[in-house]
Amino acid sequence: MKTLSIFLIGFSATIFVSCSTTSEVDAPSSASLRASVYKPGTLKPTDSVLKVKVGDKAPNFTLPSVSGKKVSLSQYRGKKNVVLSFVPAAFTPVCSKQWPGYNISLEIFKNHDAELLGITADNIPTLHAWTTQMGGLDFQALSDFWPHGKVANSYGILRSDGTTERALIVIDKQGIIRYIDVHDINKRPPLEDLAAALSKLK
């Protein structure tokens, strides 16, 4: 356990550096991303009431992805654990760092036989522009745009302004929810907490 903790601390530091620094080569792209980020200011930490709990069967869904494929939660049943990463909105500061952080730490998900699915209530063109500007993602980015926020609402994490909470939900291979973190929308959830939740899965 001590070895895992040291690894995660070092890994988190690597993610922080990777997301916070730019090289001369990627400076124009990074400048463009910074210019396009919308800063909403400090928001109410949570603004919804959960409709699910640990031990519940996860509500199924089918959503379009930036890749052009339709993705259903049920397609992973009996095959993979699933991590749902709901983020409030494209082109916002915390979200623009959180997902790239997962992009460079996918080994953690692979080691626990878990599929990461990113979900926002943005439409596909917006998600395409945002993820492209971030340099692309190595996991599926899904649009919960229409019917607007239907999936987020089924989990009870749709905010009153139509965005979603910043939430992580871990679902096992049997489709049962094993971990929920509805995080302060103004902060990134700690990677080590998610890794610890994944390590408890059989």
Image (cartoon, rainbow, N blue to C red):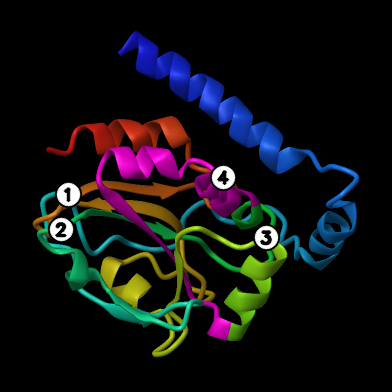
Q: Is residue 173 above or below residue 162?
A: above
Q: Which residue is mark 1?
A: 54
Q: Which of 163 and 195 lies nearest the eye of the viewer?
A: 195
The earlier-in-sequence mark between 3 and 4 is 4
Q: Could one spot residue 59 in this view of the protein?
A: no
The earlier-in-sequence mark between 4 and 2 is 2
In reply to whether residue 9 is colored magenta, the answer given is no
Image disc number at residue 101: 4
Numbered-mark total = 4
Q: Which residue is mark 2?
A: 79
The earlier-in-sequence mark between 1 and 3 is 1
Q: On the rendered image, what quadrant is the C terminus found in? A: top left
172 horizontally vs 101: left or right: left
The earlier-in-sequence mark between 2 and 1 is 1
Give the x, y percent position of residue 124.
54, 83
Give the x, y percent position of residue 149.
41, 79
Q: Between marks 2 and 1, how big is the CA–CA gap?
A: 20 Å
Q: Which residue is mark 3?
A: 135
Quarter of the image for residue 115 reads bottom left
Q: Which of 173 and 110 lies nearest the eye of the viewer?
A: 110
Q: Is residue 81 above or below residue 136?
A: above
Q: Which label sits in the foreground, 4 or 2?
A: 2
Q: Which label sits in the foreground, 1 or 3?
A: 3
The earlier-in-sequence mark between 4 and 1 is 1
Q: What range is drawn magenta here?
A: 97-124
